[in-house]
Image (tube, grey):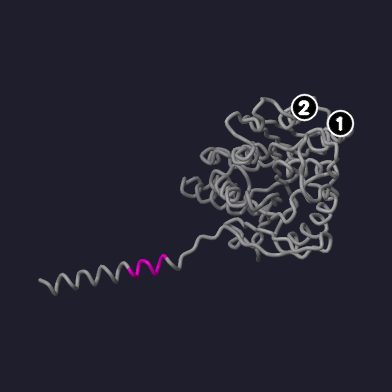
Amino acid sequence: MLKKAFLSLTLCFCLAQTSTQVFAHNSIQIGESYNLSSSVLKEQREIQIYLPQSYKKYPNQSYPVIYLLDSESNFNYLTAVVDKLSKAPYPSIPEMIVVGIVNTDRSRDLTPTIQQANDPSGRKVDGQTGGNAAFFKFLETELMPDIEKKYRSNGFNLMIGHSFGGITALNHMLNGQKSMQAYLVHDPSIWWDKEVMLKAFQKAKNKDMQNKQLFLTQAGVSTSQNGLDDHDSGIQKFNQYLSGQNLKNLNYKYSRYEDENHGSVTMKGNLDGLRYLFEGMQVNIKAVTQNPDLVKQHYAQLSKKIGFELQPSEAYLDAVLAYLKRSDQPQAVQQFQSYVDSIYPKKK
């Protein structure tokens, strides 16, 4: 009996050890990072990259790109949101590449003007400020060309910025040389330099924004113990101005989150913002059996809205086609297959 018990314990130990060894060799990776040497900023910049799950399987597929500011704070959760929302067979956003820009000198890069000594906000920022112009040059002449060379981007770009990153995104929307189609801006520091960004947008009245999309959020929990402060009032004035339709062909939405503070607003804001940008993309896959052109129609309407021809991904089309085949609808399968082949011709 003793020998039998010993063998049982030995077997359990071996199994436990084997199990531990197996799990020790499994890792979960959400992305990678590399250093980009910038001659513009005269420094090394860490760039974080997330690629869609379908990236390797579909080598002819290209993707929209998110340029994410403050990446060290936002990369992990945002990539999970993008992955979840873009999953077939019910994606509400396209699969996207996420390019995260890690800060080296945040107040230098993410402010549009040099801080004034008599700034009425009373806030004092240590170090350099007013480096947006140099940061944009780095972004547009070094980072974006590098991304377009290394990865399969399709030309649809969007920027996400929060706080100082928010006014940087707004400044790029007006003054960037390499245009982006959409901006998610969260609780921006409109108070900066006597509301310089509000004044810039006021000067741009009647400017044609060419179907650009802007999703602006505001935290409901005030940063001040005395109620409304210049941060809150600045965003409200900015929203009031944009809500007056003072810019042509701008798709704009504002959301205030009463239960979120300045730090947490990006979580809910990015979830809602991405859904807003691609509103109308999600298709009821069950309805495709009755109308095989439904996907084509949805994407045509979405492309018109965003001012960019966006095609469904191969991964999504394969999922829809597989569903149609399981539904035993040969005519729908044939019609949908023709649509797939028109976008992604088979290699001969």
Quarter of the view holding residue 39: bottom right
Quarter of the view holding residue 186: top right
Question: Could you tell me residue 43's position as x and y percent?
Answer: 78, 63
- Vertical side of 183 occupied by 20: above or below: below
Q: Is residue 19 magenta?
A: yes
Instruction: Tell me the element at label 1.
Output: helix
Magenta stretch: dominant secondary structure: helix
Under mark 1, the amino acid is Gln
Question: Could you tell me residue 202's position as x and y percent?
Answer: 86, 31
Look at the image and give the residue range highlighted in magenta. Answer: 17-23
User: Alpha carbon of mark 2 to alpha carbon of mark 1: how far?
Assistant: 11 Å
Judge the density around disc 1: few (<14), some (14-19), many (≥20) Cα neighbours within 10 Å.
some
The total of numbered circles placed on residues is 2
Residue that protrudes farthest toward the left in the picture: 1
Residue that protrudes farthest toward the right in the picture: 203
In the image shown, does 124 or 244 lie closer to the viewer?
124
Residue 305: in sight, yes or no?
A: no
* Residue 237: numbered disc: 2
In the image shown, does 83 or 264 lie closer to the viewer?
264
Under mark 2, the amino acid is Lys
Question: Could you tell me residue 170's position as x and y percent?
Answer: 78, 40
Instruction: Tell me the element at label 2.
Output: helix
Q: Quadrant of the C terminus?
A: bottom right
Horizontal side of 246 relative to 21 (left or right) equals: right
Judge the density around disc 2: few (<14), some (14-19), many (≥20) Cα neighbours within 10 Å.
some
* Residue 202: numbered disc: 1
Q: Quadrant of the N terminus?
A: bottom left
User: Disc 2 or disc 1, which is closer to the eye?
Assistant: 2
Quarter of the view holding residue 219: top right
- Vertical side of 253 occupied by 89: above or below: below
